[in-house]
Amino acid sequence: MGPVGMTPEPTSHAPKRILVTGAAHGIGASIARLCVDAGHRIIAADIDREALSLLREGIPGIETAVLDVRDLAAWTRVVDEVERQGGPVDVLVNNAGVCLPGPCEQVTAEDDRMTIEVNLVGVMNGVRALLPRFLERERGHVINVASMAAFAPAPELATYCATKHAVRAYTHSCALDHRHTAIEWTLVCPNAVETPMLKAMRKRRAGVVVFTEKPMAPEKVARAIVDAIRAPRREVLVPSGRGKLIRFLGLFPDLLSRGMDSVERRGRQALDD
C-alpha cells in the first residue's frame, strides 16, 4: 500500500502494438528488442532500409517500415498500411533524431533545417498521424524521446538543444490540450548515450560537455521506455539524479556560462583518457 493520499500509478501488462521511429540503430533498436522481450508487437520504422533488414533478421517477428519522419504524407501511408495489416497502433515512440554539431555561425543552414525537421517536425508529424486515431479509439500513448538538452544549453549544439527544448514544450502542451482524455503523454530525457550519433560527436570533438560522464548503454534508456509503457509517467529522466541536476542548472544560464570552461576541460580530459 502506498503513502496516504497517493494515487497508485496505472499499470498495464497487456501486450501492445508499438511504432518506434529511428529504430534501426542505437536507442531505437534497443527499444525494439526490449519491447519484444516484454511481449509487445513492434513496428520498427527508419529511413535506413538496409539497417531495417538487418534488424528484422536479428529480431524475428517484428514488422518494419521505411519512413522519413520529415514527410507527413509518408507517415500517413505507413500508419494506414501497418494498421490495415496488423491492427491499431497503441503506442507511438518518436525516437528518430539527428545531431549536427558545430559553432552556431558555422553550422550550415541546410544542417540547421535538417535538425529541426527531423528532431521537431518529425515528432509533430508522428503526433499528427496517430493522435486522431488515438482520440477516436479513446486510448493511446505518445512517447517523445528528447534529451537532457531539453533543460540546458550546450556549446556547439545550439540547434540540437533548441529542438529538444521545443520537443519538451510541445509534448507537455499537447498533454494539456488533451488532459481530459485517456491519451497518455511521456517525455523521455536521457543523458549522453553510446550511439552512432554520439560517436560522430566524439570524432569531431564538438559538444564535449556531454562526455563529462561516461555515456550510457542504449539499453538503459530502452528499459526506462518499456517501464513507461507499462506505467505511464509524464516525464522520465535517465538517469534520474543527473537529470534533476541539469533541469535545475538550466534555470540559471549565467551560472552555466561561468562554469562552462571547467566543464569543457573535464570533457576534453575524458576524451583523451
Image (cartoon, rainbow, N blue to C red):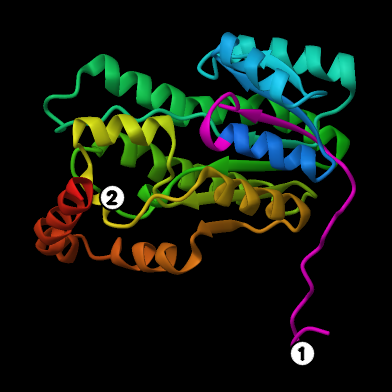
Magenta region, main secondary structure: loop
Q: Which mark is residue 4?
A: 1
Q: What residue is rendered at 64% in x and 36% in y?
A: 93
The magenta stretch spans residue 23: yes
- Please say if 39 is above or below 78: below
In percent of width and height, residue 102 lies at: 18, 31
Q: Is residue 200 above or below residue 27?
A: above
User: How much space separates mark 1 and mark 2, taking CA atoms?
Assistant: 42 Å
Q: Position of residue 24 (x, y in %)?
A: 58, 23
Residue 108 location, x and y as percent? Answer: 20, 18
Name the N-terminal-most of marks 1 and 2: 1
Q: Residue at x 26, y 36 (%)?
A: 202
What percent of the width, then of the height, locates residue 98? 40, 28
Left or right: 209 in relation to 42: left
- The span picked out in magenta is 1-27
Closer to the camera in the image, 116 or 195:
195
Name the kind of residue labelled 1 in the image.
Val
Q: Residues within 10 Å of mark 1 (few under 14, many from 20)?
A: few
In this picture, residue 257 sits left or right of residue 113: left
- Quarter of the image where the N terminus is located: bottom right
Q: Residue at x 59, y 9 (%)?
A: 49
Residue at mark 2 = 211
Query: In this view of the protein, can residue 266 be seen by the observer?
Result: yes
